[in-house]
Amino acid sequence: WEQRWVHSHKEMSQWSLIDEFASSHGEARLSLEAAWKTKNWEKVKSLFATPSVVALLEEGDQCAKMMEMYLAIQEGSLDEVDSIHAQIAQLCLYRWQLLPSISSGSQAHQSLLQQCTRLVELRESSQLLVETNAHASKQTVPDLKTLLTAWKHRSPNIFEPISEWEDLFLWRSNIFDAITSNFGWVEAGTLATLHDRPHCCIALSRAARKQDLKEVSTYTMNSLGDSIMDVDTAFLKLREEVTTYQHSSENMLKGGLNLVNSANVSYFSDRQKAEVFRLKAYFLNELRDKPKANQAYCQAVQICPNHARAWQDWGDLCVSLSDSTRKKLADDKADKKDLAKKASQYLSQATGCYLEALRVDTSEKSRDRIPHCLSMLAADGRQYGNVCRTLQARGASTPAWCWLPWIPQLLSSLCRVEARAVKPILIGILKDHPQALYYSLRSFFLERRDVEKSMPDQKSDGANKDESGDHQSSLKLAEIIMSSLRKTHPVLWNRLEVILDNLIVRFRPSYEAELLQTIIALINRTMRAEEKMNGNSDGNNNDEKRTEYYEKTLSRIGDKFFSKSASLSKKALHFQSRYGSLFESDFGPSNLRSFEELVEKLQKWKSLLERQVSRIPTKCKLSESSPALSWYSSQTPDMWAGACSSKSFSASNTRQDALSSPQFYDSTRSSALKAARASSYAVRLAAQSEGIDGYAGGGAAAVEIPGQYSPTSAGVFDSRPIPEIHAKLVRFKQILEVTSTGSTKQHVHRITMIGSDGKEYKFLLQLAAPYSTRTDERSAQMQFIMGRTFRGDIRACRRGLIVRPNVVIPLAQRMRMSATQDSHQSLESILNCMQRSSIDLPTHFQDMVDERVSRLEVTDSESRLTAEKNAKLEVYTEICQQHMPSNILTKYMMQVLPSTESLFQFRKQFTSHLAVNSVLQYAVAAVERTPTRFVLCNKTGQVLAHDLRSSYNHGLLENQTLPFRLTRNITEFIGPFLLDGVFVPSFVSICGAMSSRRNILEPMLHLLSRDDVISWYTSKTSAANDKKIQDIELQLSDRVWKNVRFVQQRLDSCAPERVENVAEAIKGNVAPIDMKVRTLVDAACCVDRLSSMPASYQAWL
C-alpha cells in the first residue's frame, strides 16, 4: 500500500509530502526525485554524499545518474555533462538488451523510452546553456525560436501519467529560469522570447484536466502568475482557466461564467472570440438559462462561422430543447400540435448545426454527430418533414468521405421517407469513392429487385405521393444511383462487374455441399427443438406437430433442389437423377411416421453426403473454375497525389484534420488559402487531362483490394481515405482452395488476390442469408465505434486496447466475401488439429443425456427438468475427465509459437482481445458462440467477432445463460494471473470508456439496433416492400429504444462508478469496482451453467 500511496501522491503533485515520507523511510531515490522537483538543489547535492546514493551510482542506477546530470547542469558544470550522458546512454542500451522484444501493448519498454527522451532533452539543455552563456557575456540576445518550437511539439501523449509530464516540464522550467537570470538587462518583451514557460504550464494544466486532476490543473495555472505572453498564449491561458470550472457544482459554474464575462476579448481574433462566447453559452446552459445560452451560441457563430465546436454545442442545445418540449407533450392540457411542431423545428436546427460543423471541420468530434443526424430523421414519421429537408439542403455540401462508415444506414434509408435527402449524399460518395459504395449498393439493389419480383400483384411504391412530388421506390433510387455510378466511372464499373459476375457464378458450392449444409442446419434445429420439448408432458401431440412442421420444411427443400425445369444444367440434372428418387422415398408425403425416424433419416443423409463431399479436392487450378479471373491482370498506374481524385473533390474534402494542433489561434492567411486553392485546381486539371475513366484521374479506374475503407479499414487513424496508397488488385493467384468451416460442413472457396504492395489477400466466398451478412456489417461498425472510443479514452490507451473490424463484403443477395488469413483458426479447427476423436462429442452428449433421463421414467415436467439437468452435469463431467483435456489450446500455441517469450506476449495480447470480444458478446446478448465461431489469429492474438448475432424475444434482447464464452481451454490458456490482471481490468476499462461517451454512442447504438431488429424481423416473415418496412419500423420503435437501454445498462453496470462525495461513499462495506465483472466471469465459468448449454455449444472445450 505504501507504493500505491506514493504513486497516487505523485499523480497529484504532492511532492512535499513525498519528500517527508522518503526522508522518514530512508528512500534515497525517492528523496532525490522529490528534492529536485521542489527545486531544493542544496538537498540534492547533500544527498549525493550519502552512502545510499553513492551505492546507487556504483550499481549503475539510471535514475540516480540522471539526477547527477540534473545537478551538473543546474550548477553549471557543463564539462561533466558529456561524460555523464555517455554513461547513462550505455546503461540504457544495456538494459534495453535485457528486455524482451517489443510488442503491441507492452509496457516493459515504456519507462526506458521515457528516460531516453529525457536524456535527449538534457543534452540539448546543456548545449542551450552554453550558447546562452556565450551570448550573455557578449551582451547579445540569442535566437532560440527553433529549439523552443521543437520542445513545444515534443510532448508526452495525453494518456501518459501526469508524473511523466511533470518530469519534462518542471525541468524545462528550471532551464528557463537559468536563461532568464542571465538576461536581466533585456527588456521584458524581448526576454519573453527566450523562454516558453507559459506554454509549459498551460500544456501541463491541460493534461492534468484531461486526466480528471483538477486540483493539479488549478495549481499549475496559478503558478504561471502574471507572466508576459503574446495574445494567443493569453487566450489559451484564459480558456484553460475557464475550462477547469466545467462539470462542477453550481457555485463553480457561476464562477466560470463570471470569469468569462470579465475577460477582455478586444485583442482576440474572431475565432478566439467565438470560443469565448461558446464557453459563456456552456455555463448559461448548465445554469439552466437556455434562452441566453441559445443567444450566446448565435453570437459565437456570427462572429466566426467556421468555428465547428460552437456549431456542435449549439446542436446539442437544440436537441435538449427538443427533448424537454417532447416531455411536455405528456401533459393533457398542453397544445400538442404546437409543441410537436416546435420539437420538430428544434431537431431540424440541431441537424443543420451538426451538418454545418461537419462542413467547416471534419474532425472526429464533428463526424461523431453524423449518426445523430440519421437517427433524428425518425422524428419526421411518415411525412417528409423539417429534418429531412434540412438533411437534403445541407448534406450534399459536407465531405463525402465522412459518411463512409454509415453506408449501410444510408442505403437502408432509401426505403424510408428520407430517401430523397439521402440520395445526394450517396451520389457524392460514388463520385469521390466509388469502390467504397459499389459492393453494398449492388447487393442492396439485387435484394430490393428480388423483393419487387416476389410481389408482382402489388403496386409499386412509386405511385405514392407526398407534398414534394412523386416518391420513388428504393429499387428505383438504387437503380438511378447504380446508373450514375456506371456513367461516372465506366472503366472501373466494367472491371468490377466482370470480377463479381465470375465470383458469383463460378464459385458456388456443389449441390451436394449445399444440401449437406441444409441437412446439418435442420439436424441442429431438431436438437434444439427436442431440448425445448422435453419438459412438456403432452409428448404425443407435440411429436405429431413437430413431424408435420419438418415435413413442410423438407418439402420446401425438395422443391429447391429437385424441382423439374427445362433450363437446368448438366450438373443439376445429374444431381437430381442421383438423389431425387432417394430423397422422395425418405422424406416424401406420408413417409415419416415419427420424429425419431425423421432424425434417423437426417443422420443417414448427412453421412451419405459427407462421403460424397469429402471427395472434392482441397485445391484446384483457378483456370478450371474461372478462366476470366485466371487471365485477369492489371498494371497499377503511377499513383501521384490526386491521381484518384474526382472533379468534385472540394477544398473541404482535402482539408487536413487538425486533431492535435490548436484550433483556436491558427490564423488563416489569404496567401496560404490562395496557394491551397491553386494547388487543388491544378490537381483537378491534371486528373482530368490524364483520366481514362470519364470523371476522375487514371488511378480511379484501378480495382482496389476490398475492405480498405471505413468501417472495415485496419488503419490506426480515422481520417480521409487516400486511394492513391490503397493496395490495388494486380492479379488472382492461380491456385484455388476449397475449405470446410467445421461442424457445419460448409464447403467454401478461398480465393487469393495479389495486391500492388506485394501482399496476398485471401477471401472466403460464402453463401449466407442477407440477415447474416448485414449482421456482420453492423458488427464491423460496432467494432469501428469501439476502436474510435478507445483512442479517445485515457485508461484504454494506457492498456493498449485496440479493435480490428472484420472485413465482410456483400457480393449478391446470398453471397458474401470474408477476409481471412492462414493464421485464423477456430477453436474447433484447433481441436481437430490436436486431437482427432472417433466420437462425435455433441451427438454423444445428447445421446447419453437422453439415455439417462429415459432410465428414470419420469412423468411430470418438473422432475424431468431436474433429471435432465443432473444428467447433463454428469455427462459433461465425464466428457471433461475422459475425452476432452483442458490444455488443447495451450499445447497448440506452444507448437505454433517459437519461444516462451513469444508465448507470454501472445497470451497477454490474446487476453486483451478476448476482453474486447467478451464485452461485445455481453452487451449485445450474442448467441450461439460455438467453437466454430470462436476464431483467433495465432500470430497477433486477435479474437474475431464472426457471426455475432443477438438473441431476440419478440424483438427484445434477452439475457443469456452464459454472458460470454470462457470455457475450460480458454481459462487454462490465459491462466489465473492474466485473468485477474489483464482480462478483468481491461473489461472494466472498456465498459468505462463506452459509458463515458453515453450521449455520443446512443444515436449510434440506435441506428445499429434499429437496422438489426428490422432485418431480424423481415428474415422471419415474407418479403417486405418499402411501405411495409416503414410500418414495421413504427411498430418496433419502442423495442429498439428498449434494446438501446439494455446495451447501455449492461455497459454502465460494469463501468467504474464516479463518486462525488468520497467520504460518504467509503462508509460501510464498499464493493470493489470490478465486482460486477468478476460476477460475470464466475457465471461464464460456472459448471452448472456450462453443462446446461446445448450440445452444439461444446462447453467442455
Image (cartoon, rainbow, N blue to C red):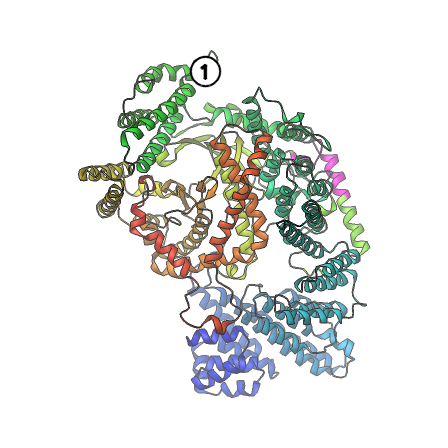
Residue 180 image-quadrant placement: bottom right
Say which of 144 and 572 sits in front: 572
Residue 382 image-quadrant placement: top right
Say which of 320 and 175 sits in front: 320
Q: Please state if 327 lies on the left or on the right of 919 as rendered.
A: right
Q: Please state if 279 lies on the left or on the right of 754 as rendered.
A: right
Q: Position of residue 693 (x, y in %)?
A: 69, 31
Disc 1 marks which amino acid?
A: Ser
Q: Please state if 824 lies on the left or on the right of 696 as rendered.
A: left
149 in relation to 770, above or below: below
Q: Position of residue 963 (x, y in %)?
A: 40, 50
Q: Position of residue 1055 (x, y in %)?
A: 48, 59
Q: Is residue 343 magenta?
A: no
Q: Position of residue 745 (x, y in %)?
A: 36, 32
135 in relation to 1043, above or below: below
Give the class, few, some or many, for how many residues have Cα within 10 Å of label 1's Cα (few <14, many ≥20): few
Say which of 527 and 146 sits in front: 527
Q: Is residue 694 magenta?
A: yes
Q: Residue furthest top?
A: 566
Residue 139 image-quadrant placement: bottom right
Query: Magenta-highlighted stretch: main secondary structure?
Result: helix
Residue topped by disc 1: 569
Q: Secondary structure at mark 1?
A: loop
Say which of 76 and 152 sits in front: 152
**Measuring 29% from the left and 36% from the top, which residue is drawn there?**
536
Q: Which residues are magenta?
A: 681-700
**Measuring 68% from the left and 39% from the top, which residue is drawn there?**
425
The answer to whether one can see residue 807 in this image is yes
449 in relation to 282, above or below: above
Q: Quadrant of the N terminus?
A: bottom left
